[in-house]
Amino acid sequence: MVIVDKITKTYNNRKVLDNLSIKINDEEIITIIGKSGIGKSVLLKTIIGLVKPEKGRVIIDDLPLEGKNIYLLRKKIGFVFQKSALIESLNIGDNIGLALKFVQNIDPETIKGKVIDALAKVELKPDVMELFPSNMSGGMLKRAAIARAIVLNPKYILYDEPTTGLDPIVSRTIEDLIVNLNKDLHITSVIVTHDLNSAIGISDRIAMLSDGKITFLGNTESFVNSKNGDIMEFRNSYYLKTGE
């Protein structure tokens, strides 16, 4: 379980996260939605320890994310960045195997086997290992980024806008992949997205972030039927923008 306990983070004299608390249950898919620039990605990066709050703390599996615990707990967490963040000068095999090389310090053949296994889990063939990021489509890049996130067998995966820049068909395949990995690997998925249909389609719970706080937390049915002002404004703006 991840417990975000009363965290506050300020940028340019604005409280992006304001005494925010949320509990994330094991093996669930929880999606955090909200307007652009509201602090969703900051919350994700706080959970993994890339951003340090001024107040409050994050507790993962009963350990506070601080001091020597940070290195230990980060091994339990995979992170899928919005733009995949693959290293352009490395082929896909080396990108995925990088953490195995430096974190687990295992031999090249073992690394290759684990990379091939990770690729299979995201439905990519072994020959993809020889490709470079510049030679791959957006959907393949996203799958490779997810393979890199799961290669260390994490307990948690954090996704920052996993379908941004993808067409609707590819977006649906990535969403299906997230759901299947969550179930097959018994992991916990925390997703930040502005795609309302995606959030409703794959989440066990949805959290609404507004003015630095979680203003709604519930299952998808309660979200769809909610009369919460922040949710209604977000829903109306989203459907108006997408024409749905």
Image (spheres, rainbow, N blue to C red):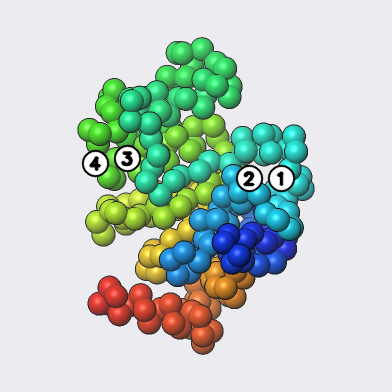
Q: Is residue 38 left or right of residue 175?
A: right
Mark toward the start of the polypeptide (1 vs 3): 1
Q: CA distance from mark 1 to mark 3?
A: 30 Å
Disc 4 and disc 1 in contact, CB within 8 angstroms: no
- Asked if marks 1 and 2 touch (Cβ < 8 Å), the reply is yes
Compute the Cα span from label 3 to label 4: 6 Å
Q: Would you call the spot at circle 2 few (<14 residues within 10 Å), some (14-19), or many (20 or more)?
A: some
- Residue at 45% over, 13% down: 109
In the rendered structure, the answer to whether residue 50 lies left or right of residue 240 reads: right
* Residue position for label 2: 49
Q: Nearer the viewer, residue 25 or 82?
A: 82
Q: Which residue is mark 1?
A: 65
Q: Amino acid at mark 3?
A: Leu
Residue for point 48% across, 79% down: 231
Q: Which residue is mark 4?
A: 137
Q: How many angstroms separate mark 4 from mark 2 (CA)?
A: 30 Å
* SS at badge 2: loop
- At 29% from the left and 54% from the top, the residue drawn is 165
What residue would you read off at disc 3? 141
Expressed as whole percent of the image width and height from the top left, the position of residue 155 reads 60, 42
Q: Amino acid at mark 1?
A: Leu
Residues at discs 3 and 4 in contact (Cβ within 8 Å)? yes
Residue 216, horizontal then vertical, whole percent:
58, 75
What secondary structure is found at the residue carrying circle 4? loop
Q: Sort mark 1 into few (<14), some (14-19) or many (20+) by Cα contacts within 10 Å.
A: many
Q: Earlier in the sequence, mark 4 or mark 1?
A: 1
Q: Is residue 66 visible?
A: yes
